[in-house]
Image: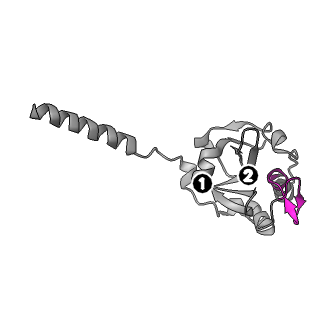
Amino acid sequence: MKIRKLLIVFSMVTVLAACSSSPDRAAHTQQPYNTADNAPFLNEYKKWQGVPYRLGGTNFSGVDCSAFVQAVYNDAYSVKLPRTTAQQVNIGNKVNYNNAQSGDLVFFKTGYKTRHVGIYLGGNTFMHASTSKGVILSRLDNPYWAAKFWHFRSVN
């Protein structure tokens, strides 16, 4: 009987240990985001940092997420992106989470029909126009964003 109880306890400990182990993180999340390759993005971020969120806004007095992404790509790389998140989610190619790279667009489902977009910088960091804090850097592993994450898309 004692052996049976020990086996049950051992089995329970093994199961709990397996449940608590953390998954392997993608290599891109381990890299720093403030690299020379990101200089064009970070220079744009410095211009926009703190600009308040405004639905439909497209300038420094207020900007929404898709207009911010559109402006950054235009000013940093002369790349013309569509204006809305609904249009931006159809450009380029979907990228597997483990293969995300700096410059990929990162999309979130923030509501039943509401979508949000930002620019991934690597190192688990993305820049975006937050509805509550304006233009900021955020982390993908923030519980809010991790729960809302949808997918990455490359900009081709």
Secondary structure beneath dot 2 equals: strand
Q: Which mark is residue 124?
A: 1
Q: Residues within 10 Å of mark 2 (few under 14, many from 20)?
A: many
- Give yes or no for residue 97 being in the magenta stretch: no
Residue 149 drawn at (x, y percent): 64, 44
Q: Position of residue 34 (x, y in %)?
A: 64, 64
Q: Nearer the viewer, residue 117 or 25?
A: 117
Image vertical order of residue 48 relative to residue 55, above or below: below
- Give the Cα distance between marks 1 and 2: 12 Å
Which region of the structure is painted magenta? Answer: 54-69
Q: Is residue 100 left or right of residue 69?
A: left
Q: Are marks 1 and 2 in contact (CB under 8 Å)?
A: no
Q: Amino acid at mark 2?
A: Gly
Q: Which residue corresponds to mark 2?
A: 118
In which image quadrant can residue 115 be found? top right
Residue at left offset 74%, top offset 47%? 116
- Find residue 90 and report its horizontal and vertical position in percent: 80, 36
Residue at 86% over, 56% down: 71
Q: Is residue 123 above or below residue 155?
A: below
Q: Secondary structure at mark 1?
A: loop
Magenta stretch containing residue 67, yes or no?
yes
